[in-house]
Image: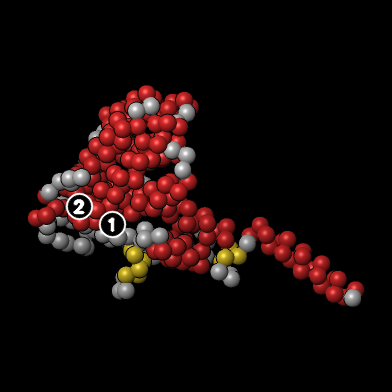
Amino acid sequence: MRGRSRDAAALMRAKRDAAPGQMSGGDIPETAHRRVYADLKQRLMSGDFVPGQRLVVRHLAEQFETSAMPVREALRQLVSDEALYDHPNRGVIVPEATVDTIGDLTRVRCKIEGAAVEWAAATISTAELEQLEHVNGAMGECVRVRAMVEYLTLNRRFHFTIYRAARSVQINQIIERMWLRAGPWLNLVRDGTMAGTGLHHHEEMIAALRSGDGNAARQALVADITDAADVILRAAATPLRVLPKARRRPDARSKRTLSL
């Protein structure tokens, strides 16, 4: 009996010691996997990866200074989220930016994100409104100095400040998944093509949210999304803009603009 007690105590100590670095999938440190997954999500939403780009496990592991296993698990999860695509010949890649995909996802974003903005008009706080003013002002400064990477990062912060103000965990999860798909398209306009495009729409959103006018806030958001999508459509139709090796002839359909 005493031996069993010692064995039980040893087992409890082992569980306690393992707790800070729990294992996921049997042999993958969960903390490392979560760190890689969270960082890759942010990079996808910020346009750090090019549509069509192949993500190599070894290269990512070197960047994150970790083993290959957490990277593989993170990529597997992002494929499950439909943020990445497991190509049968090329491996895990960022989905291509096609006219149909951009148009379809943009229409869905207008509906879902429009609902979140409309809800936020009734629940947003004064502190959140002040944060929106600050972020939009910083975006204007980024346009002035041509700091496009920071501009796009601030743009994401602006939008998600509003979406969080809707006080809905479920709709925020849906929106995040859509941004994982749409984020890489921003890489096509990092040259400044889209600089300042939505700042006046942001001002309209802030004014509508401050007055509690959900319908006006939704209309400003839809205009912001569709204006940006039209710029991205033109960029995606430009030869050699997606990947240097992915030579393609412009699709005549790509000249159309979005209609909701």
Q: Quadrant of the C terminus?
A: top left
Q: Quadrant of the N terminus?
A: bottom right
- Give residue 89's position: percent from left, percent from top: 30, 74
Question: 101 left or right of 210?
Answer: left
- Give residue 234's position: percent from left, percent from top: 16, 47
Q: Amino acid at mark 1?
A: Pro
Q: Is residue 117 visible?
A: yes
Q: Secondary structure at mark 2?
A: helix
Q: Amino acid at mark 2?
A: Ala
Residue drawn 25% across and 48% down? 107
- The answer to which image quadrant residue 79 occupies is bottom left
- Give residue 92's position: percent from left, percent from top: 36, 66
Question: 145 left or right of 68?
Answer: left
Whether tag 1 and tag 2 are in contact, CB under 8 A, the answer is: yes
Residue beneath disc 1: 51
State how far apart marks 1 and 2 are (Cα): 9 Å
Mark closest to the chain's N terminus, 1 or 2: 1
Label placed on residue 236: 2
Viewer-closest of 258 and 56: 258
- Give residue 101's position: percent from left, percent from top: 24, 56
Residue drawn 24% across and 37% down? 223
